[in-house]
């Protein structure tokens, strides 16, 4: 059984924990540097507010150890704000974080909370899937080595790169566990 560390400083982490637990994974909440002493098999960077999460990662001393895990190739599932944290570049902000995913992301690309929406779109290797976008970013540029998994309204909204699965939308909202299962299949 895989142990998944879920960043639990802010945002929609509980929904990820429920989804992963239903698939047989053990979840541990990462709230402080103390929680990082036992290295998990994989990591979830949930949706929420990326600037708050980035600030809390720095203040709690979790940034450097998590960055090291990502550099070593730890599997990660990043949704919405998590995608922003992984992005190498942001087109409308200078506050990047881990910079391990060679893409350029536009924060709040679909507008404010009122611009949130639900659609169904194809996800490569998965099939059609309901996608919940909540103040979501999208990916404006993708390096050639990054696999595009899904597009919505012409914009890239899901990618796979090495051991990083990054999404603009929230698969943890709802009952479709296929992307979480794909993430668990990435475990060593």
Image: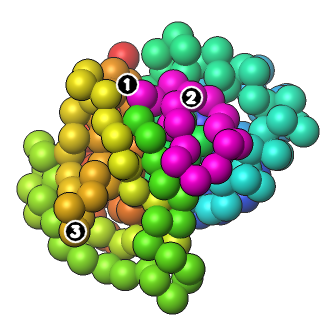
Range of residues picked out in magenta: 87-102
Quadrant (top left, top right, bottom left, bottom right) of the C terminus: top left
Quadrant of residue 107 in the image?
Answer: bottom right
Magenta stretch, main secondary structure class: loop
> Is residue 7 or residue 114 the one in the foreground?
114
In the rendered image, the residue lying farthest to the bottom is: 114
Instruction: Label 2: state its secondary structure.
Output: loop
Residue 33 image point, x, y percent: 83, 30
Residue under label 2, please give it: 99
At x 18%, y 73%, the residue is: 120
In the picture, measured across the screen, residue 42 lies left or right of residue 148, that is: right
Q: Is residue 136 in sight in this rendering?
A: no
Q: Give the residue pinned by disc 3.
A: 153
- Check if residue 174 falls in the magenta segment: no
Report the Cα–Cα distance between label 3 and label 2. Answer: 26 Å
* N-terminal label among 1 and 2: 2
Judge left or right: residue 94 versus residue 72: right
Residue furthest right in the image: 59
Element carrying mark 1: loop
Mark 3 / mark 1, whichever is N-terminal:
3
Between residues 74 and 154, which one lies in front from this camera angle? 154
Are dots 3 and 2 in contact, CB under 8 Å? no
In this rendering, is residue 102 above or below 94? above
Mark 2 nearby-residue class (10 Å; few <14, some 14–19, many ≥20): some
Secondary structure of residue under mark 3? loop
On screen, 179 above or below 117? above
Measure the C-alpha gap from mark 3 to mark 1: 26 Å
State the residue at coordinates (46%, 47%).
105
Q: Are marks 1 and 2 in contact (CB under 8 Å)?
A: no
The image quadrant where one finds the N terminus is: top left
Task: Tell me the residue that label 1 is attached to.
Answer: 163
Q: Residue at x 44, y 41 (%)?
A: 104
């Amino acid at each position: 059984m895989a142990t998944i560390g879920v960043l639990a400083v802010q945002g929609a982490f509980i929904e990820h924990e429920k989804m992963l637990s239903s698939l047989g994974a053990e979840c541990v909440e990462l709230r402080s540097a103390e929680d990082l002493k036992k290295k998990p098999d994989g990591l979830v960077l949930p949706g929420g507010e990326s600037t708050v999460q980035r600030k809390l990662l720095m203040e709690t001393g979790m940034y450097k150890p998590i960055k090291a895990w990502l550099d070593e190739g730890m599997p990660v599932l990043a949704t919405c704000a998590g995608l922003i944290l992984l992005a190498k570049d942001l087109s409308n902000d200078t506050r990047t974080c881990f910079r391990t995913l060679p893409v350029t992301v536009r924060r709040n690309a679909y507008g404010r909370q009122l611009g949130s929406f639900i659609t169904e779109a194809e996800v490569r290797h998965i099939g059609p899937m309901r996608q919940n976008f909540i103040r979501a970013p999208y990916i404006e540029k993708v390096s050639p080595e990054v696999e595009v998994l899904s597009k919505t309204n012409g914009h890239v909204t899901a990618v796979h790169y090495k051991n990083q699965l990054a999404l603009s939308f929230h698969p943890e909202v709802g009952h479709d566990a296929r992307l979480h299962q794909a993430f668990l299949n990435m475990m060593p």
